[in-house]
Amino acid sequence: MLRGSCLCGGVRYEVAGPLASALNCHCSMCRKAHGAAFRSRAGVRSSDFRWTQGEDLVTWYETSPGTHRGFCRVCGAKLLSRFDFEPKWHGLPLGALDDDPGVRPGQHVFVSCKAPWYEITDSLPQHQEWPPK
Ligand SMILES: [Zn+2]
Ligand SMILES: [Zn+2]
């Protein structure tokens, strides 16, 4: 069981299953949403995810049609993304995890949108947008 929480501690969640396809996303939406060079995220089955506290504090912002990013309305921490077109999977920002998920980001995506002030210094694969399927 993996646990995560927001910055103020008002929202908590649990993940009961393995995370999938961890990666670093450099797209401009992720950069702005997180105020960071990139967002580290993984996929989580929606059936494995549950809020354990403070779900009423989670506010959803639709960043692109059908993609909703959930954040704590008290502290602003990014907690989860859900997709109208893929309801079986959620996107989980790794930064809010309290436990080690075991997985590590394996690639960089949307490097075409990378911040000019950030240099990727690891040897992970880089993709201009999404990796080829
Ligand atoms: Zn919070
Ligand atoms: Zn992104």
Image: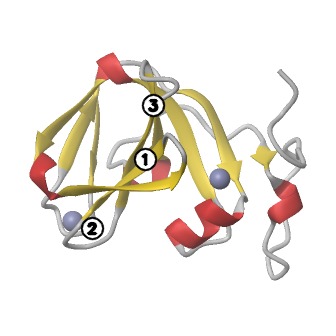
Q: Mark 3 points at which residue?
A: 84
At which x and y percent is residue 119?
85, 71
| C-alpha separation, residue under disc 3 versus residue under disc 2 | 27 Å
Return the residue at label 2: 7
Q: Residue at x 50, y 40 (%)?
A: 66
Residue corresponding to mark 1? 68
User: Disc 3, disc 2: CB below 8 Å?
Assistant: no
Q: Which one is in front in this view, the residue at disc 2 or the one at disc 1?
A: 1
Figure quadrant of residue 1 = top left
- Residue 56 rendering spot, x and y as whole percentages: 11, 52
Give the residue type at disc 3: Asp
- Asked if the residue under mark 1 is in contact with the one under mark 2, i.e. CB atoms within 8 Å, the reply is no
Residue 121 in view of the camera: no
- The residue positioned 31% from the left and 17% from the top of the image is 47
- Is tag 3's residue or tag 2's residue first in the polypeptide sequence? 2
User: Mark 1 or mark 3, which has the lower sequence index?
Assistant: 1
Q: Which class describes the residues within 10 Å of circle 1: few (<14), some (14-19), or many (20+)?
A: some
Q: What element carries label 2?
A: loop
Q: What residue type is labelled 2?
A: Leu
- Label placed on residue 11: none
